[in-house]
Amino acid sequence: MTFTQIIDFRTSRIDDLNRLVDRWIEQTAGRRTATHSVLGEDRADSSHLVEIVEFSSYDVAMRNSQLPETERIFREMVALCDGMPTFTDLDVVRDESLYKAASRRFLAMAAEEPELARLDEVLAEGYHGHDPTNGQDVIGMDAVRREIGRWRDGFDFAFTVEDQIAEGDRVCTRWTWRGSHVGDFLGLQPTGMDVSTTGTLVHRFRDDGKIVEGWWQYDALGLMARLGAVEG
């Protein structure tokens, strides 16, 4: 179970504290066990700070605490603080990345949403799509609907999300696409074949959580070869 520690403290010496943390990071390279750390400053009181540190488990966090450098940084941190920091230990019972969920929902909607009318719930109106197999980029909601419609005309299909990584305003989704060739696709008459391909989709989000840009990568040539359109 993922473990998170929240450290709440006050200091007027934030620059000194940052230098202290940088030194600890350098000294513990290859041995520290935290997976993510966020330091936030109270907008109403710049001397009030909260650090959120994530670990893969409580036991892993304890190994981090037992590093000699961690004990030293704690003593030096206390000396920089206005009073004793408080620590809250949390076992994470739910971890939902909203950007990841939006990327998954987009793929599900592309395959399942009957009229695609609700795409604007996840895509910004000026969405810009990049697909190296297209002669030109897909820009705008109407163009997205036409592009999805082209695939739907040719296939009954679904996506399986295999993996996702999120950082900042980007989400990378690794997916498997499986479809039955039931209609005309790029001039290729239906074969009835069941085919599949794998790929990735990187989404960029804006502040309101809508997707503004996407980059597709997948084995289009291999897919067409399996359909008999080109020699494999």
Image (cartoon, helix red, strand yellow):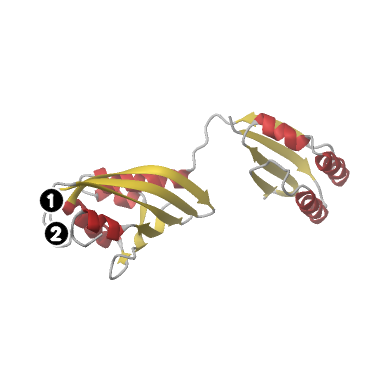
Q: Residue furthest left?
A: 189
The quarter in which the N terminus is drawn is: top right
Which is more toward the observer, 1 or 182?
A: 182
Residue 47 position, x and y percent, is 77, 48
> Does the image show residue 196?
yes
Residue 174: percent from left, percent from top:
41, 49
The residue where tag 2 is placed is 188
* Tally of numbered discs: 2
Neighbor class of circle 1 (other Cα within 10 Å; few <14, some 14-19, many 20+) is some
Task: Tell me which residue sits at (70%, 43%) in the image.
Answer: 51
Callout 1: SS: loop
Three-letter amino acid code at the position of disc 2: Leu
x and y, in percent, of residue 203 in the image:
42, 55
Secondary structure found at label 2 = loop
Task: Tell me which amino acid carries mark 1.
Answer: Thr
Mark 2 residue crowding within 10 angstroms, few (<14) / some (14–19) / many (20+): some
Residue 134 found in image quarter? bottom left
> The C terminus appears in which quarter of the rendering?
bottom left
Give the residue displayed 80% in from the left and 53% down from the top: 23
Give the image location of residue 130, x and y in percent: 36, 64
